[in-house]
Amino acid sequence: MYHLNMEERLRKLKDLREKGINPYPYKFEKTHNFSEIKENFEKLNQSETVVTTAGRILTIRGHGKTAFATLSDENTQLQIYLRRDRLNEKFELFKLFDLGDFIGIKGTVFKTRTGEITVLVDEFSMLSKSLRPLPEKWHGLKDIELKYRKRYLDLIANPEVREFFKKRTALVNFIRQFLNQKGFLEVETPILQPIYGGAAAQPFKTFYNALQQEMYLRIADELYLKRLIVGGYEKVYEICRDFRNEGLDRFHNPEFTMIEAYEAYTDYEGMMELVEELFQFLVDNLLASSTIKFGDNETEIKKPFKRISYIDTLNKKVGFDILNASPEQIDNLCKELKIDYKGLSPGSKIDKIFSALVQKEIIEPTFITDYPKLISPLAKEHRKDKRLVERFELVIFGLELANAFSELNNPIEQRRRFEAQLAQHEEGIREIDEDFIEALEYGMPPTGGLGIGIDRLCMVLFGQPSIRDVILFPQLRKD
RNA sequence: GGGUCGUUAGCUCAGUUGGCAGAGCAUCGGAUUUUUAAUCCGGUGGCCGCAGGUUCGAAUCCUGCACGACCCA
């Protein structure tokens, strides 16, 4: 377990303790962080201000009776300079410091011959002893599996990764800011649910001992947020971690972050406007340009987004009316497209065909509108076509980023849809959420609802090719 | 689930036709009072992912397994 590199460090740890130094002290008060020292250099330098600061040692360059070290704090790096003639016998203590250790220093700032802002150290202390060697300073940590499994090392060794995850947080904060400004109320609903619903997906099961009852980690929070609309809130949203017990690849992590928003007295047209406005807001606040790149593709985020009809586009592609096609016709198409269609409902087959023929080809931000009723049990029937519902998905670079409906608020129709879904024996619900229907029976106003996948949005806006690059601790098999 | 590729020192990577296990950084010892991928001299460090097989001999060829990446489903 302890390799040779560690033995030396353990020796130094012991040495520190023998000298009466606690290698893991409790607290250290900084007067400045590194950015503040750099930004205020002239003032600090002229007034000979004594600064107190701290960071992790990244490199040490020893020169006999002096030493330079580069430290890292959360945002940037700073060089320090230690001299035997200033520190006297305490200078020798620095030999017990290694790369990776946290050091606290006190000193004055100056510029070296080459113009680098540096702190000339008058006092220094061990803030935490590191027992393991850091990844290499020049190449960083490249091994992709190690980067995911030991993200802390990735964050230490690759400052751009540390920077990237700040951008993810900024993205979420701007979404919050946007919705809050619009008068939406952020709420929290259960992650542990006795009945799962709101999407077609397999849940993670667990067991609640106190109630002696099986529970599920939510696959969506749709049904709870709609209950809140029934309750009288008119605009609500939740930034929710959802869980789906399904495959794991470049676009799927079993736990992922969604934002779901519901607004009373509007419909899916209203949700399209909201999405366009939100995306504009995010681009303005987060990106240098409205042009985004993903793999070999490039596009611009600019409203209004293109709108295409699900059925019209698909029918044009296949050359017949797919909603009136025979089961054989659809199966043959699946075979042609090498889709594994066994056990799928007619609706799911059509959706797989759509995904292969239409969705994958879409690059520019596009609203796909008016989905088949078969695959949309929670959306309201289309006002002009009974076979369809008022639903859209936003697709960019072939990826589904948002999904929205004019929400179905007719309780009788909702029960029929759930029953039809149960009869299909399809993945998705196994039990009707009677309380949800009861809530609808008390009356839900006309409502527009929207879900946006935050992880994928992050991938697309920031050009990250894998969902594992936008999740701090992506799921991997236990090694 | 299927296919392709990968796994060698703490990290980044070489390793020729099957013939002694290598480099840089890190680490240790020495020199060095403005360096910055510091420099110079000398060391330490290996279950070559794991388990089998072929062979006089395997990091290298074969089989299985584990983990990962990409593609397909």
Image (cartoon, coloured by chain):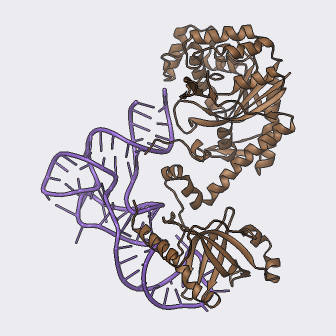
Chain colours: A brown, B purple
- Reply above or below: A443 against B53: above
Query: Observer-nearest residue: A386 or A417?
Result: A417
Q: Judge whether residue A383 can be spotted in this image.
A: no
Residue at the limit of the structure toward the front, as seen here: A210
- Reply above or below: A306 against A324: below
Query: Observer-nearest residue: A55 or B11?
Result: A55
Residue A312, picture quadrant: top right
Is A118 left, or right, of A134 in this rendering? right
Residue A184, picture quadrant: top right
Residue A100, picture quadrant: bottom right
Q: Residue at x 62, y 55 (%)?
A: A161
Percent x, y for residue A144? 50, 51
- Reply above or below: A363 against A468: above
Q: Residue at x 65, y 28 (%)?
A: A220
Query: Observer-nearest residue: B20 or A359?
Result: B20
* Figure disc tally: 0
Is B31 left, or right, of A468 in this rendering? left
Q: Residue at x 71, y 47 (%)?
A: A169
Q: Residue at x 39, y 68 (%)?
A: A4
Percent x, y for residue B30? 44, 88
Q: Judge whether residue A462 can be spotted in this image.
A: yes
Check the picture and name the quadrant holding the N terminus of chain A.
bottom left
Percent x, y for residue A108? 73, 81
